[in-house]
Image: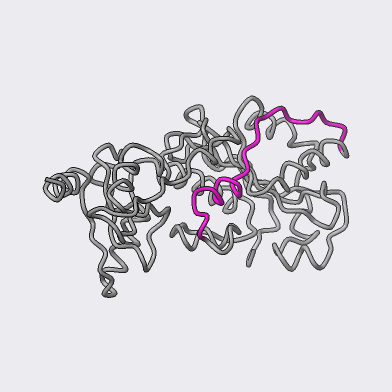
Amino acid sequence: MTSISTVPPPASLVAETAAPDFVVIDVETACSRVGSICQVGIVGFRNGMEVFAYETLVDPLDDFSYFNTRIHGITCDHVMGAPTFGDIHAAIDGHLAGRITVAHSFFDKGALGAACAAHGRPVIDTTWLDSVRVAKRAWPELPSHRLNVLTKFLGVRHKHHDALSDARAAGMVIVRAIEHTGIGLAGWLSPASGRSRAAPKPAATGPLRGERVVIVGAARDGELARSLAAAGARIMSAVGTTTTKLVISDDQPFGRFVTAHVEHRRAEELRRGGAAIEIIAEGDLRGRLALALT
């Protein structure tokens, strides 16, 4: 954090207008004691859109270490007059309890539990989803799944180690992973779902042999992916320099906004740089395959 007001910001930044599909929480801590929460950010998402945001500085009633302050920029001066965790426990519980709560790694889950214990408050009853695990399954080819790496890859604006920005970014990881894989929120909660979504193996021969294909709007193990793999295509999880085709599923939910999809943008950027990536609709490619196989 490069600049922080010494006056605590309003806790509710955006009014909650609809029940979210999931909420995301991120916390910053004052020192090595995991319960020393000094900032909380919570964002709610519904149908892929942000519906509310909550952020506040927190007096951790603990020391600030140089190491932690160097990371997030928060000092004891910034939290002077801010509420304690005990003061905001009810607000956090109101946002998280009974819902699916996303955190980028379960550090935040542990910090909340430790803070609840330290302040004599009940543990918040919520269903946790780790966005690191989701990202690793959605984009296994990435060398790192740190939040700042993911936001750069996905083209998401992000101020690292600011609790609200981190929560918003982790929420977008979930939104983009759902778009990219076709796995719904319930599917990501199942440990088996990630294993069942492996791309089908390409056939040794076929009109698409040697093609490296990314699909927008359909699952990597769905019928379209199986059809293309049967024709020899290797189904990839994300557009890269070796991608040869970006296939737009007939069932893709983005309508005319498909051009804003991260994979479409990456394909267009690579094409402008001279890469030979074809962007083609599912129906057109199926027609081409039918002619090739007759």
Residue toward you, 294 or 11: 294
Q: Which residue, as the protein is rendered here, is positioned at the far bottom?
A: 274
Q: Position of residue 180 (x, y in %)?
A: 41, 47
Q: Is residue 99 left or right of residue 7?
A: left
Q: How is the image coloured?
A: one colour
Q: Position of residue 278 (x, y in %)?
A: 23, 60
Q: Is residue 285 left or right of residue 124?
A: left
Location of the C terminus (image quadrant): top left
Residue 130 screen position, x and y as percent: 63, 43
Extreme residue toward the top, this view? 98
Number of marks drawn: 0
Query: Does 135 appear in magenta?
Result: yes
Which residues lie in the magenta part? 119-141
Residue at 64% in and 52% down: 163
Residue 274 located left or right of residue 75: left
Say left or right for 53 vs 214: right
- Residue 124 place in picture, x, y as percent: 73, 30
Magenta region includes residue 213: no
> If the image is split into quadrants, where does the N terminus sit?
bottom right
Residue at 59% over, 53% down: 166
